[in-house]
């Protein structure tokens, strides 16, 4: 049973009301690999991301991080475990708090765990540099930047706690080709240097095959462990 | 791959026999800001022919959407528009969209001869009316039967039953399809579609693109504003690449995708995941501080001294590109 550290959704079943969305799905993402997840619209890809990110409690089955089973969701999970998994969502407009400057948006998760301000400033500067946000952009609020710039800020925020796992749910769908390639390059670089596990969801088959080390169909992930 | 397959092979010479529908000449748009001026569109020339699907592509913030709004007279009060954009019509006098005035635009042009699929459907729909009421209102204003509404809904891939919902009850993709149906209701001869596939999944993206392609094959013209190069490659007859408020290259889609001549067009194509998957180095300039010379020069591998000081030539449809050192392939130069 010894194996490399991994994020595992083990035989997960989720329903909303009477509608079953995920039926016994098992998906494993190892540290150091990028897994692509494909599947038609409405097949439960985003729900699986929410389960893996500990944002949604499955009806059956459980999520484990590096072998540690996680019970409970959101704030019921210890911070140390919760911050191991980060998500980059499809729509930065919906994900980002419109009241915060990009700097504050990135710093917020650090402030939430009472990181000293000098450390925060240093880390934010490092991340904005990494994702390519210029100083004049950092003071702006979401309404004053483009989707691509805002998604870069969201990526910086997702990486702020140096997560071991990053889940990207259609995170580049609204970006132009150059920004998409840039965001993907930053994530691939992070995955290699930090030996992180990355899950990529996109409808774009070409992008998926180019980006991911291996591609799984959600239908294949269901009932593989019966 | 299906995404790169063309829907219809362009007929050689097809464009040559079509009449020009829209002729844009030296169009410029400036915004007055508190302490500066923003150049959103600069010295833009463009010809769109009947039956042509033109895709305008470029990074976000390059001025694509401002171009659409300028053609429809929908810019805010701090905008100054210069140049000409002449809309031709077989049964009516040509009209210059820049100089004809809001009254004429509102009564004769907007929504009638030139339709717009707006970028964010959520903000474009009246929240207190159902989709059916919005659609019926539009159809009746243009002398069409309310029964046509169901067919229009089907055309855009929307279940007619969903027309009875209010905008907040629609998903982003459904709202997107509804605004497309509304724009098509008056059967405009020119449709400007600003990112019409946002929020749609792949099958619906393809469905919408097919719909636009079909309109062109029936003789209307479409200006498709998109950041999705694969979409442009799939349906467009011609592609205009915009960078920092200028069109830098505009030519047949096949030529542009196989042999781009402007270094920016080439760099943008290289960012595609089925090509080099390499982002264009650096960042686009602020539209409030455009350099005197070529705006792409700081990011360009082919730059020389002249690029920093001299503005590049103006790009012409099917001809010149806005570059001092365009890429020539196969030439013996």
Image: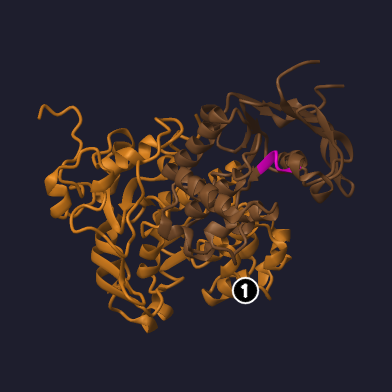
Q: Chain of mark 1?
A: B
Report crowding for label 1: few under 14, some 14 to 19, many 20 or more residues within 10 A (C-alpha).
Answer: some
**Residue farthest to the left, as pictured:** B333
Asked whether A87 falls inside the magenta stretch, the response is no
Secondary structure, mark 1, is loop
Report whether residue A145 is seen.
Answer: yes
Residue at x 89%, y 41% (from the top left corner): A59
The correct choice, above or below, for B299 with respect to B111 in the image is above
In the displayed structure image, the side of residue A92 where residue B323 appears, left or right: left
Residue B16, percent from left and from top: 24, 48
Q: Quadrant of residue A213?
A: top right
B12 or B228, which is in the foreground? B228
Q: Position of residue B21 (x, y in %)?
A: 31, 61
Q: How is the image coloured?
A: by chain
User: Which quarter of the image is occupied by the C terminus of chain A?
Assistant: top right
Q: Nearer the viewer, residue A217 or A32?
A: A32
**Rendered shade, chain A:** brown
Reading the image, the residue beneath label 1 is B126
Task: Tell me where residue A82 appears, x and y as whole percent.
Answer: 75, 43
Task: Name the side, left or right, on which A18 lies relative to B24.
Answer: right
Q: Residue at x 59, y 49 (%)?
A: A157
Magenta segment? A82-86
Residue sitting at x 52%, y 64%: A141
Q: Is residue B321 left or right of residue A69?
A: left
Q: Is residue A175 above or below residue B40?
A: above
Which residue reaches farthest bottom? B103
Q: Nearer the viewer, residue B274 or B12?
A: B274
- Outermost residue on the top side: it is A1
- Quarter of the image where the N terminus of chain A is located: top right
- The residue located at (35%, 75%) in the rendering is B33
Q: Colour of chain B?
A: orange
């Amino acid at each position: 049973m010894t194996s490399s550290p991994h994020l595992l959704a083990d035989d997960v079943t989720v329903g909303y009301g009477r509608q079953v969305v995920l039926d016994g799905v098992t998906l494993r993402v190892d540290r150091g690999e990028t897994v692509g997840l494909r599947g038609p619209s409405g097949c439960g890809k985003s729900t699986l991301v929410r389960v893996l990110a500990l944002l949604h409690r499955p009806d059956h089955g459980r999520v484990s991080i590096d072998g540690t089973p996680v019970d409970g969701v959101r704030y019921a999970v210890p911070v140390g475990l919760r911050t191991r998994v980060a998500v980059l969502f499809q729509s930065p407009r919906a994900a980002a708090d419109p009241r915060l400057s990009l700097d504050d948006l990135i710093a917020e998760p650090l402030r939430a765990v009472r990181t000293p301000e000098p450390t925060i400033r240093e880390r934010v500067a490092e991340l904005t540099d990494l994702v390519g946000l210029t100083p004049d952009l950092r003071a702006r609020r979401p309404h004053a930047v483009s989707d691509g710039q805002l998604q870069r800020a969201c990526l910086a925020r997702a990486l702020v706690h140096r997560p071991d796992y990053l889940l990207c749910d259609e995170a580049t769908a609204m970006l132009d080709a150059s920004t998409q390639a840039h965001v993907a390059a930053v994530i691939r670089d992070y995955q290699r240097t930090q030996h992180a596990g990355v899950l990529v969801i996109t409808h774009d088959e070409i992008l998926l095959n180019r980006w991911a080390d291996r591609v799984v169909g959600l239908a294949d992930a269901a009932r593989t462990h019966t | 791959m299906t995404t790169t397959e063309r829907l219809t092979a362009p007929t050689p010479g097809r464009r040559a026999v079509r009449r020009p529908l829209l002729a844009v000449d030296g169009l410029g748009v400036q915004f007055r800001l508190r302490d500066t001026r923003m150049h959103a569109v600069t010295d833009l020339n463009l010809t769109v022919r009947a039956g042509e699907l033109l895709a305008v592509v470029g990074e976000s913030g390059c001025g694509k959407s401002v171009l659409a709004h300028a053609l429809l007279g929908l810019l805010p009060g701090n905008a100054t528009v210069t140049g000409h954009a002449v809309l031709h019509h077989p049964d009516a006098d040509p009209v210059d969209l820049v100089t004809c005035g809001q009254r004429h635009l509102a009564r004769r042009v907007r929504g009638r001869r030139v339709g717009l699929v707006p970028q964010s459907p959520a903000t474009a729909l009246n929240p207190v009316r159902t989709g059916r009421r919005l659609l019926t209102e539009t159809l009746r204003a243009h002398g069409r039967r309310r029964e046509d509404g169901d067919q229009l809904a089907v055309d855009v891939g929307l279940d007619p039953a969903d027309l009875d919902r209010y905008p907040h009850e629609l998903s982003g993709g459904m709202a997107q399809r509804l605004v497309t149906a509304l724009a098509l209701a008056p059967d405009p001869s020119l449709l400007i579609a600003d990112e019409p596939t946002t929020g749609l999944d792949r099958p619906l993206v393809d469905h919408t693109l097919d719909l636009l392609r079909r309109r062109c094959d029936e003789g209307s013209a479409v200006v498709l504003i998109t950041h999705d190069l694969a979409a442009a490659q799939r349906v467009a007859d011609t592609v205009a690449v915009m960078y920092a408020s200028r069109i830098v290259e505009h030519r047949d889609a096949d030529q542009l995708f196989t042999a781009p001549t402007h270094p920016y067009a080439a760099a943008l194509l290289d960012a595609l995941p089925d090509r080099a998957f390499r982002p264009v180095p650096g960042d686009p300039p602020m539209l409030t501080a455009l350099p005197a010379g070529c705006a792409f020069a700081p990011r360009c591998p082919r730059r020389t001294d002249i690029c920093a000081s001299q503005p590049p030539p103006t790009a012409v449809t099917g001809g010149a590109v806005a570059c001092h050192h365009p890429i020539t392939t196969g030439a013996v130069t």
